[in-house]
């Protein structure tokens, strides 16, 4: 059995986050020792590692909840898990597209400034006036 501190150290998940996942129902509430310390099993450690990895991939709490529920039924087809992963992939690709637009616009405005004084600085003017931007990067 692991204390919450040991669980935190072995998974790299902060203690308040572990408590949050318990409150959200992603982790079961830990058993308590006679001294009222939380005690976690290896199964809970594995679950927390699963949650951490899913969060690193940007999955929402609700998507993680669905995946955990699915994992409790190994006989089911994995179409729902595939759907969740595909939706997250689409979200990531949208973010990448947006970041590419931001990159292009920042590169453009940072190379337009040929002034030595802030009053004539193109970067400052472009930030103050969105109409000077070439791309729609909202």
Image: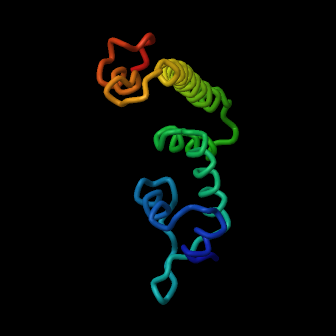
Can you say which quadrant of the picture contains the N terminus? bottom right
Can I make out residue 106 in this image?
yes
Q: Based on the displayed image, in which of its 4 quarters is residue 10 positioned?
A: bottom right
Report the side of 11 relative to 130 (left or right): right
Rendered view: 109 above or below 15: above
The residue lying toward the viewer, choosing from 42 and 9, is: 9
Q: Is residue 69 above or below residue 85?
A: below
The residue lying at 43 percent from left, 59 percent from top is: 20
Question: Where's residue 134, x and y in %?
Answer: 44, 10
Q: What is the x, y in percent for residue 70?
A: 60, 40
Residue furthest to the bottom in view is 35
Q: Quadrant of the C terminus?
A: top left
Q: In this view, does 79 lie above or below 24?
A: above
Examine the rendered structure and indicate whether residue 136 appears above or below residue 59: above
Q: Which residue is drawn at 33% across and 12% down?
A: 131
Q: Where is residue 122 in the image (x, y as percent from the top left)?
A: 40, 21
The answer to whether any part of residue 94 appears in the image is no
Residue at point 59%, 57% (across, down): 48
> Is the image coloured rainbow, by chain, by secondary structure, or in one colour?
rainbow
Residue 3 relative to residue 20: left or right: right
Give residue 36's quadrant in the image. bottom left
């Amino acid at each position: 059995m692991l204390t919450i501190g040991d669980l935190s150290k072995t998974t790299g998940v902060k203690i308040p986050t572990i408590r949050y996942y318990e409150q959200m129902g992603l982790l079961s509430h830990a058993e308590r020792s006679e001294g009222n310390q939380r005690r976690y099993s290896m199964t809970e450690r594995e679950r927390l590692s699963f949650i951490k990895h899913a969060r690193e991939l940007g999955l929402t709490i609700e998507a993680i909840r669905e995946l955990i529920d699915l994992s409790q039924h190994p006989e089911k087809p994995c179409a729902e898990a595939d759907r969740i992963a595909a939706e997250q992939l689409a979200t990531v690709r949208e973010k990448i597209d947006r970041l590419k637009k931001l990159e292009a616009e920042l590169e453009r405005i940072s190379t337009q400034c040929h002034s030595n004084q802030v009053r004539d600085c193109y970067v400052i003017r472009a930030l103050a006036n969105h109409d000077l931007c070439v791309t729609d990067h909202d």
